[in-house]
Amino acid sequence: QQPVQSPQAVILREGEDAVINCSSSKALYSVHWYRQKHGEAPVFLMILLKGGEQKGHDKISASFNEKKQQSSLYLTASQLSYSGTYFCGTLRRPGSSNTGKLIFGQGTTLQVKP
Amino acid sequence: EAQVTQNPRYLITVTGKKLTVTCSQNMNHEYMSWYRQDPGLGLRQIYYSMNVEVTDKGDVPEGYKVSRKEKRNFPLILESPSPNQTSLYFCATGGLGNQPQHFGDGTRLSIL
């Protein structure tokens, strides 16, 4: 049931771009994205509610392909502050089993080097 | 200021000694959750609560109990802790619909 994230880890130089993918085997209602710095709590980035929805926050954006049950997080011109572990969280469709569960992927560790 | 407060932040204890981790929120959220985080496994949901007196199992509920007697509080209870429950625990509120989930600062438990 846990969504699958890829890649597991990525190392970038400042200014480079990265894409993190999140796939689910179940029909999705929404996808959440969070970033966790080492030793800290996860922090909310964005939620995508509708298939085809795209959102952006500074140079971080995401898309949600409802039909493919996938979401992707795009980090453009990465900065040192982008380093951390990124988690996607998925909510099932209302009316299906386990709709109350926000289930997280295993995380993608991103390291941005100078 | 929106807050999710967990206590304690750190605890070292011994097998079998009952413990409670408290969680309190000031956002009037109906939905609250407990997660454990272990290396390589991400955040795994232990229990969640849709409202007062409404709780349900997450993915890894064995060995844990919760209660939701008031909207703001959602304590996690380990009746007889064992070493495999050594982990980093997060309480969270919100997360349904278009609501972001807010996490507490975490509780690092070590069960010897």
Image (cartoon, coloured by chain):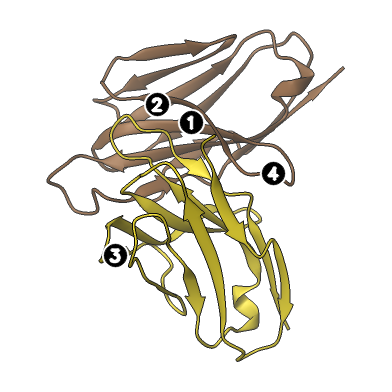
Q: As shown in the figure, which amino acid type bears the numbered disc 1?
A: Trp
Q: Residues within 10 Å of mark 1 (few under 14, many from 20)?
A: many
Residue A10, located in which quarter of the rendered image? top right
Task: Give the quadrant of the N terminus of chain B.
Answer: top right
Labels 4, 1: front one = 4
Residue at x 29% of width, y 65% of height = B56
Q: CA distance from mark 4 to mark 1?
A: 16 Å
Is A47 above or below relative to A27?
Answer: above
Q: Nearer the viewer, residue B88 or B23?
A: B23
What's the residue at 32%, 29% (across, down)?
B98
Q: Disc 1 and disc 2: Cα gap in Å?
A: 6 Å
Residue A18, horizontal then vertical, whole percent = 62, 18
Q: Which is more N-terminal, label 4 or label 2?
A: 4
Which label number is shown at residue A40? 4
Please, which chain is the residue tagged with disc 1 on? A
Chain identifier, colour yellow? B
Element under disc 1: strand
Q: Amino acid at mark 2?
A: Ile
